[in-house]
Image (tube, rainbow, N blue to C red):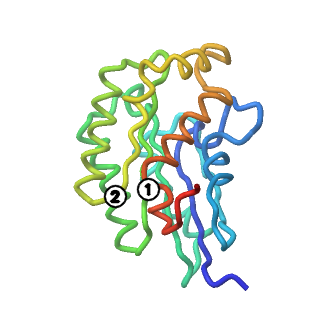
Amino acid sequence: MSERDVRICVVGDELSAGMGDARGLGWVGRVVARTDSEDPLFVTSLAVPDETSTALSGRWESECQRRFAPGSDNRLVVALGSADLTAGLSLARSRLNLANVLDSARSQQVEVFVVGPPPRPGVDGDALGALSDAYADVSTRRQVRYVETFAPLRTHDQWLADVAAGDGVHPGQAGYGLLAWLVLHNGWHDWLGLPHPS
C-alpha cells in the first residue's frame, strides 16, 4: 500500500504535451520514465497550444484542483512558452502572471517547479532570452526551482537540427530528450524528495 500519493499537474503550451514527438513522450514522459519512485506518481499534462502566461494563470487552478486531492502531495509544473511575445504582452505582465501563479499555489501548499521557454524558430532570440530571465527572477525571488532551457539550447546544434528536421517549429525525439535532460539535471529529484538515479 502506497503511503505517499503524489499528484503532478503540468501546465503549459504544446511542448509540454510532446507535440512533434514520434514516440509521443515529449519531455514530460521522458522525465517521468527516469523518475524512480517507490510510490506511483500521477502525472498529467494539461497543455494548451500557443498559450500565453495570462491564459495559463487564469486556468491552472480550476484544472489542477480537479486532479488534486486533500491529503495528497499536490504539485504543479509550470512549463512556460514563448506565446507572450507573439501576443505582445509586456515583460511586466508576464512577470506578474507567473508571480500570481506561484503565490496562489503557495497559499494552497502546492509545490511548484518552473521550466522556462526554449528557443523557438521565428521568435526573436533576444526578446525570448529577456523573457526567460524575467521568469527566472520571479521564480528565484520566491525560492521556486527554475530550469533555464533557452540559454543552453539557443545555439545547440542537436536542438536546432532536430527542430529543422520536423515541422520547423517543434522538436522531435532528440529535442525532447534534451529538454528532459535539462529538467532531470536541474533539481527535479530534489524537488520530489527522491534520490538521484545512479
In this rendering, the answer to whether 151 lies above or below 192 is above
- What element does badge 2 sit on? loop
| Residue ID for mark 2 | 144
In this rendering, the answer to whether 77 lies above or below 135 is below
Residue 133 place in picture, x, y as percent: 28, 37
Give neighbour class at mark 2: few <14, some 14-19, many 20+ (Cα, 10 Å): some
As drawn, which residue projects farthest toward the front?
198
As drawn, which residue projects farthest toward the right?
23
Image quarter of the C terminus: bottom right
Image point (59%, 19%), residue name: 163
Residue 176 place in picture, x, y as percent: 61, 34
| Residue ID for mark 1 | 113
Q: Are marks 2 and 1 in contact (CB under 8 Å)?
A: yes
Residue 155 place in picture, x, y as percent: 43, 18
Task: Give the CA distance from mark 2 to mark 1.
Answer: 6 Å
Q: Amino acid at mark 2?
A: Val
Q: Amino acid at mark 1?
A: Phe
Question: Could you tell whether 165 is left or right of 156 in the image?
Answer: right
Image point (62%, 68%), residue name: 67
Image quarter of the N terminus: bottom right
- What element does badge 1 sit on? strand
Image point (24%, 46%), residue name: 137
In this rendering, the answer to whether 198 lies above or below 173 is below
Camera-nearest residue between 164 and 62: 164
Give neighbour class at mark 1: few <14, some 14-19, many 20+ (Cα, 10 Å): many
Q: Which mark is residue 162?
A: none
Question: Could you tell whether 156 is left or right of 96 in the image?
Answer: right
In this rendering, the answer to whether 180 lies above or below 121 is below
Residue 181 place in picture, x, y as percent: 54, 41
Image point (63%, 84%), residue name: 3
